[in-house]
Amino acid sequence: MTPPNADDPGHLERRGELRPPNPQDALDPAAFESGMARLVEILVADEVAQLDHLHIVILRSSLTTQFVGPFPDAIAAACAAEVEIQTNEQLAEEDRLCITVAPLLSPSPS
């Protein structure tokens, strides 16, 4: 599954949600704050849209990286990560893994 508009990095600008910065806005703290709030809204909306897409669990040690999945959505991947975390906590400190959940995106066109 491909997230909506994943192959189109300019989709936010064309929808009018993201505009090039106005140099005058840098001088206006209210405009800057409003722009930052809008940017956060856009980023959160994109992240929420990805929750229903395929996700993987990434297990990293100092020597290797493993990928587990794909899982049908973020919740299923988070549940699998929780099992890995519980197992990980039983290991010696130096053997513990860094465990992350990430969306599985389609490859970028070359």
Image (cartoon, grey):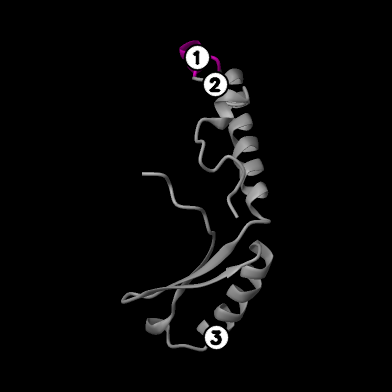
Q: Amino acid at mark 1?
A: Asn
- Asked if labels 1 and 2 touch by Cβ distance under 8 angstroms, the answer is yes
Residue holding disc 3:
87
Vertical arrangement, residue 29 with respect to residue 61, above or below: above
Q: Please report the residue visible at 44 percent of the width from the left and 76 percent of the height from the top.
A: 97
Q: Which residues are magenta?
A: 21-28
Is most of the magenta stretch helix, strand or loop? helix
27 and 68: which is toward the camera: 68
Say what secondary structure mark 3 lies in: helix
Q: Nearer the viewer, mark 2 or mark 1?
A: 2
- Asked if labels 2 and 3 touch by Cβ distance under 8 angstroms, the answer is no
Q: Is residue 71 left or right of residue 7?
A: right
Q: Amino acid at mark 3?
A: Thr
Q: Residues within 10 Å of mark 1 (few under 14, many from 20)?
A: few
Q: CA separation, marks 1 and 3?
A: 51 Å
Q: Amino acid at mark 2?
A: Arg
Residue holding disc 1:
22
Q: Please report the residue visible at 41 percent of the width from the left and 44 percent of the height from the top.
A: 109
Of the two numbered discs 3 and 2 on the same chain, state the one appearing first in sequence: 2
